[in-house]
Image: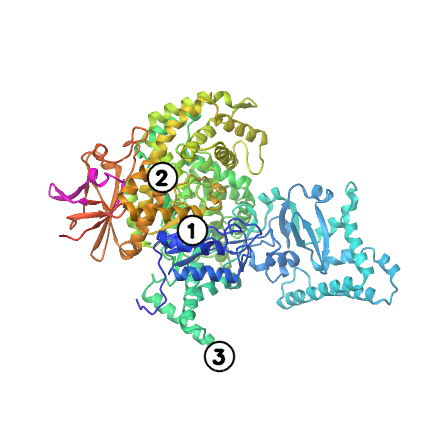
Amino acid sequence: MDQHLPQARIPSATYRLQFNSGFTFADAERIVGYLHDLGVSDVYASSYVAAKEGSVHGYDVVNQTIFNKELGDEQSHQAFVDELSRHDMGHILDFVPNHMCIESGDNVWWMDVLENGMSSLYAHFFDIDWEPVKKELTGKVLLPLLGDQYGRVLEGGGLQLIFRDGAFFVQCNALQIPVEPRSYLLILQHRLDALREKLPPEAAPLQELLSIETALQHLPLPTEQDPEKMNERHREKEIIKKRLAQLCLGSAEVAEFVEENVRVFNGTKGDANSFDLLDRLLRDQVYRLSYWRVATEEINYRRFFDINALAAIRMEDQTVYDLTHTLLFRLIREGKVTGVRIDHVDGLYDPVTYLQHLQQSAWMNLRERSEGAPPEEGAEATREEWERQYDEVLEGDPGYKPFYTVVEKILMKGELLPEQWPVCGTTGYEFLNSVNGIFVASDTAKQFDRIYDRFVKRESDFTEIVYEKKKLVMQVSLSGEVNMLAHQLNNIAEEDRLTRDFTLNSLARAISEVIACFPVYRTYANSASVRDRDVQYIDAAVSKAKRRNPAISGSVFDFLRDVLLLRSPERASEESRRDWLCFAMRFQQITGPVMAKGLEDTAFYVYHRLISLNDVGGMPGRFGTTLEAFHGQNLERNKNFPHAMIATATHDSKRGEDVRTRIDALSEIPALWQKQVARWSRLNKRRGSLIENARVPELNEEYLLYQTLIGAWPVGDVDDAGFEVFRGRIREYMIKALREAKVNTSWVSPNGTYEEAVVGFIDAILARTPDNEFLREFLPLQRRLSRCGFFSSLSQTLLKMTSPGIPDFYQGTELIEFTLVDPDNRHQVDYGRRIEALTELKRREQEEGAPSLWGGLLEREDERAKLFLIYRVLNYRLEHKELFDAGEYLPLEAKGERARHLCAFARKAGGGVVIVAAARLVATLMPEEGSSPLGEAVWQDTLLLLPEGIGGQLRNVVNDAVVDVVLHEGQSVIPLAALFGEVSVALLEQLPLP
């Protein structure tokens, strides 16, 4: 490839930072040196464009064109970027193209829509159905902001008219919603006679007010679609507001008149009729305020999943694309952002077109960065030439990507990223589940089925649970979206005499059933042809739905399949074909939210066979990952997406990576687990409650709780204050888990009595009292599993740093820590402690050497062991980038009694080679509390078989130990007793032959 072309900066390792008011640009600047010392090459930042005030995550974006002022300004951002540049570090930014927060007055585009409706210059920015199924909402937007029925809120004074700066607003909670300007007439003409009594007819203030009313009467309607009229409305309404503001400033009489009318419109509590005026005003708005529960069935703007506060934007519109990417492209052009992570790519109408457009835009901005902005005269021709050159480069190298781009995308079993997506890969959910799975003893699956089923006293089929929970989500959260699809499909059916007899109800049921059976998050049809893989997914879903529903005519399902596969009749018109494609693309946008809410946010909180498997991108119905599958996925990634991110924790994780490895260890001791968990339940039975003759907590919830305690329990001695903090975290986690499960309580309908009973149970079993027999029996097993998890965490971390892909570290996880799902994993990170820890480790490394230092860290289960491992391996990776960027991946085998307890592979490039070896399934190797998976007694005769050409001596980068390669039956091998004599992880490099 021509080296003069823009080249994507490929990271060596990334570190995710969560920006919010508690962690600003200045805070990030202060830790850049630490991250550099750790071996991180690129900071991976959460979205830091303007978000809703107080946002802790940045995904509730209100303006993509400016920085979030809570994080700093242009200068503090520049200082952060300059610090990165001084350390030669890159900067990947999380970008949110799918949605914006609409519950903030700072979202000026949405506020403009609420003021002007369809005539807003920004109406096309948002995915609003202005002609929805509910005809009363034609030309309006449903705003489900109210905490109760509209009438009750209104008559309770919960909606208040206010006047400021010449404009009227409705105060709803903390939000001030604009009033449609023409409807100002209702306010300004009310009690006009009272003003006339105070001012003579020729008085200038009265004449100005009447002139303003005339201007309002001539204002184009909010339904106006003629561009000229829309611009006129946009211009004139602002002039009217300025005139009204000036009038009120200059005339006390008019100001008093307006103020009194506002008071009258706001009614009097206890007098229902006094709210009629405000009710009439609200009926004339381009929005309809409603109880938040109404959104489930009647919402007419697309949301991010089922979150009313996040409205989808139409990124397929060129104007929307250009405006929302203004800041991002400036930062790319200025060299301040060197990569991008695209959030929720599956929410986009046409992901592939968006991603292709993004790479082309990056190319254009990178060309401008290298060559300078073209002079105004001839600028268009220059840019056209750049575009032509880009097309030419792509024709010669279809895989060329000028900018590092990864997508947040969940891949199901066997699913691959669409080959035409111009991205470097995903953000790593699939690796998270793959690597975690090798620490689960997959051969005990049936035993764990029996243990779980016996404990909860029912049989559990995960596939069936997912199906049922997806249907539940479509009933209680997303029924409006399914209803919209059904009406759209019904309109298509009505166009053809062969399909017009399909009823709306049968079409709605078919859609719901096919979505419930859909095997992946979504498909990606965007033209007349459908990818072969998408055809397979659609065929599988329709076939399964037909088998589950023999009472529904199969012809209805066949019709739906034909539409989704775009198999329109030959006689179909072009308009009809467009309708079919539009339906298929809308259908694709809904299957993802249903899968996410049904699988991740419901089924994962219902099915608890082994909860370490319940994480984003995982399928807990599969009990672990075989080594063959793990190596196969690594080989596939190395071939197709060698620069994809690979993660072991993200801000969306259901539990921290070090929590998972503790719970994984249970899979190796099924008999002991069954005995212990049954014993604990008997001991704690009297601490539960009875509500309506039902035990609280349910057995399934209790099973979740015991595993959670094993995973999250703090290491070492904890004082009473610290233990109370831990107990509070468990309470909060369990309440969230119960509500997500939607069995005995939920976010929609919290069952306070039930939740209080569960909290009481938690407090009782965690009481630090001499008579708490449960804790006495629980702690020895927990300590044993904690030590197993400690060694597995080191193995997991090494495998992430050396497998194909770019290792990503979620903030704070460089130390071993035991966080649960958000908000528990989004706390502020104590970087002072981490900087101090790394400084101390480096000092001791120099003074006493790595082998001695490792001995103490492992003996004490020191949280800093993980930090030290990361520091040594990431810095080695930086120095040998070619091996890991483009190196071959060679799975290695072991031979001997403990062969199954080893995961090993080689990375090979440019004549260099490294060997990676990590212990796994260590609970079997550590039968006693306090033991370690080290030495000859553990590893016995087990040998690591090396690839050809490896001999002499190898140095373990982890601890500087030197091991000898020996011959065994004619093959070069390393005895694991020697390799894992002091540490249970190894990154081996060849030492020069003497």
Taking the image as drawn, is residue 803 in sight? no
Query: Is residue 164 placed above or below 865 in the rendered structure?
Result: below
- The magenta region covers 963-987
Q: Residue extending furthest left?
A: 970
For disc 1, the marked residue is 16
State the separation of the CA atoms marked 2 and 3.
65 Å
Q: Nearer the viewer, mark 3 or mark 1?
A: 1
Residue, x 40% and y 49% (percent of image)?
Answer: 835
In the image, what residue type sits under mark 2? Asp
Of the two numbered discs 2 and 3 in the rendering, the one whose residue sits closer to the viewer: 2
Label placed on residue 377: 3
First reached walking from the N terminus: tag 2 or tag 3: 3
Q: CA distance from mark 2 to mark 1?
A: 23 Å
Using the image, determine if residue 511 lies above or below residue 454: below
Q: Which mark is residue 929?
A: none
Q: Nearer the viewer, residue 577 or 387?
A: 387
Query: Can see residue 265?
Result: yes
> How far across and how far down the image is residue 524, in percent?
42, 53
Quarter of the picture holding the N terminus:
bottom left
Q: Which element type, helix, strand or loop, lies under badge 3?
A: loop
- At label 2, counting other C-alpha atoms closer than 10 Å, the crowd grade (few under 14, some 14-19, many 20 or more) is some
The amino acid beneath tag 1 is Arg
Name, please, the residue furthest toward the front: 847
- Numbered badge on residue 862: 2
The crowd level at tag 1 (other Cα within 10 Å; few <14, some 14-19, many 20+) is: many
Q: Could you give the CA–CA distance between mark 3 and mark 1, rounded to whole angstroms?
A: 43 Å
The residue positioned 18% from the left and 45% from the top of the image is: 946
Residue 675, percent from left and from top:
37, 23
